[in-house]
Image (cartoon, coloured by chain):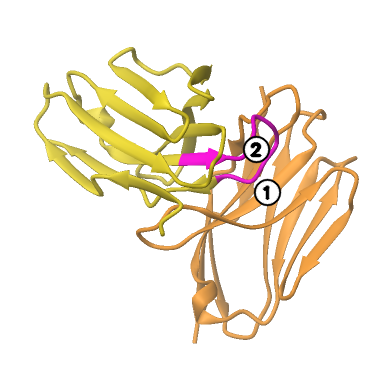
Amino acid sequence: GENVEQHPSTLSVQEGDSAVIKCTYSDSASNYFPWYKQELGKGPQLIIDIRSNVGEKKDQRIAVTLNKTAKHFSLHITETQPEDSAVYFCAASNKVTGNQFYFGTGTSLTVIP
Amino acid sequence: DTAVSQTPKYLVTQMGNDKSIKCEQNLGHDTMYWYKQDSKKFLKIMFSYNNKELIINETVPNRFSPKSPDKAHLNLHINSLELGDSAVYFCASSQRRAIEKLFFGSGTQLSVL
């Protein structure tokens, strides 16, 4: 089955700096890679996703890049703000696994004002 | 209106008891899920239902029994609770049985004493 690894497990940045979280996956059939943000006491919420026919996707301060050859994808947050502090999860899925998502182990991001 | 709502938010109980968690979604989605998040924040799928039909059943003890009376509801019943069952349980839904955005509920924190 699919194995998704995520690094780092914790990340602290100064407000205004950039944050990068990286994930690798093992199943070359995986073709959908979402990122979820989980705030304290809440459920995860999708913030951005990318499909394997695209190398990069941006949404305001958030971007995701995908390298299919190396089987890794990354989340980039620019101009970080205190409200970006949360746990971030990457995930991978494909047609074979259907709607079964394999999640990374999470990154706890702290943005220091 | 809350899209995916689950009750109760907190559940504290003794070992050996039986308890249920309820989930409802008002998004008109066809597919619903139960995820377990352990103390290290690791998210793992337990079950998935598509239009009341069980489609994913991970290696979960048979003390856990999901029930979907209709496609808007997915409940989780747990028999003979054990200490290791303590975790946060998330209900989620997606529009179709496909690679789709997941909408999560706010979670039920189960503590088994």
- Report in which chain the residue with disc 2 lies: A
B33 left or right of A90 in image: left
Along the line of sight, the residue nearer the viewer: B76 or B68: B68
Please say if B81 is above or below B10.
Answer: above
Q: Could you tell me which secondary element the residue under label 1 belongs to?
A: strand
Answer whether residue B57 is visible to the viewer in this image.
Answer: no
> Where residue B37 is drawn, which disc sits there?
none
Dot 2 falls on a residue whose secondary structure is strand
Q: Quadrant of residue A74?
A: bottom right
Q: Which mark is residue A4?
A: 2
Q: Could you tell me how many numbered marks the image carries?
A: 2
Provide the major secondary structure of the magenta segment: loop
- Give coordinates of residue B70: x percent, y percent: 43, 27
Residue B80 drawn above or below residue B38? above
Toward the viewer: B93 or A81? B93
**In terms of depth relative to the viewer, which is nearer, B3 or B100?**
B3
- Chain coloured yellow here: B
Query: Which is nearer the eye, B98 or A45?
Result: B98
Q: Is residue B99 magenta?
A: yes
Q: Position of residue A81 (x, y in %)?
A: 56, 81
Q: Check the picture and name the quadrant holding the N terminus of chain A.
A: top right
Residue at image x 16%, y 23%?
Answer: B18
Residue topped by disc 1: A34
Q: Please give the range of residues in magenta.
A: B92-102
Amino acid type assigned to the residue bearing label 1 in the image: Pro
Q: Colour of chain A?
A: orange
